[in-house]
Amino acid sequence: QSVLTQPPSASGTPGQRVTLSCSGGSSNVGSNYVYWYQQLPGTAPRLLISRNHQRPSGVPDRFSGSKSGTSASLAISGLRSEDEADYYCVAWDDSLSGPVFGGGTKLTVL
Amino acid sequence: QVQLQESGPGLVKPSETLSLTCSVSGGSINSEFWSWIRQPPGKGLEWIGYIFSSGSTTYSPSLQSRVTISIDTSKNQFSLMLSSVTAADTAVYYCARGGYVKVASAFDIWGQGTMVTVSS
């Protein structure tokens, strides 16, 4: 069982806006940065969002991150078929003194 | 740009030690954190541990008793050793730059991953 909770699946149609959630506690999401990763089938994860809402160079502005309290969200607007992937959130956990991953959300583009 | 490449045996016998190396190219291994992360087949990601270029390490509490991460700055490489492996250690193992995410050292560059199967 993962320290950070993500819904196992989500779906949307092309062009739609979808929001993926990541829920934690005061020792992780509530007091530290949240990062988001995209993992396309058969590939290594790719950093999508850094420090709650910052997009690394090369990440389209269709992807945006936010955080409120002990929950974080990744929003994808103008959904495309190539966005079909697994998405993971990560945060530092002060109790465990290390980074913790969410269980991941599998996004399906219908 | 910086690239990472994992190498090591793809098959390890139960109770033996898994050993992998990550080669860093296109940049220096110095002044950075470097991590190992794994992903069992069909499952999510699990952080194993990280090392700073000085040699200082931090390990996942769940694996700490079996893990050793080391670094060779002269070769621009860092390594993972996981002892007393069982079938539960079967996974794709990734090396990545970063890990001390509390201070924004994100896992920003990843190797392609290497599959390690534990079986007799």
Image (tube, rainbow, N blue to C red):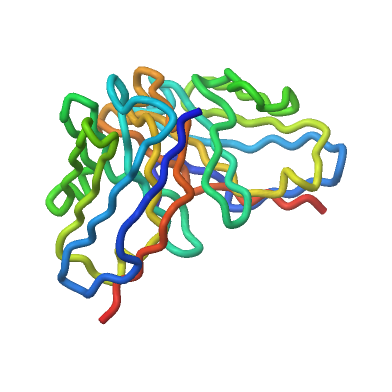
In this orientation, which residue lies closer to the viewer: B108 or A67? Answer: B108
In this orientation, which residue lies closer to the viewer: A22 or B68? Answer: B68
**In this picture, residue B25 sits left or right of residue A23:** left
Quarter of the image holding residue A32? top left
**In this picture, residue A80 sits left or right of residue A104:** right
| Residue A63: x %, y % from top left | 69, 28
| Residue A77: x %, y % from top left | 78, 31
| Residue B95: x %, y % from top left | 37, 43
Farthest residue to the right: give it.
A15
Farthest residue to the left: give it.
B65
In the depicted structure, whether residue A76 falls above or below residue B102: below
Residue at image point 40% right, 38% down: B96
Quarter of the image holding residue A73? top right
Residue at image point 66% right, 24% down: A64
| Residue A79: x %, y % from top left | 80, 38
Residue at image point 59% right, 31% down: A48
In the depicted structure, whether residue A101 falls above or below residue B86: above
Residue at image point 65% right, 49% down: A85
In the depicted structure, whether residue A73 falls above or below residue B81: above
Label tally: 0
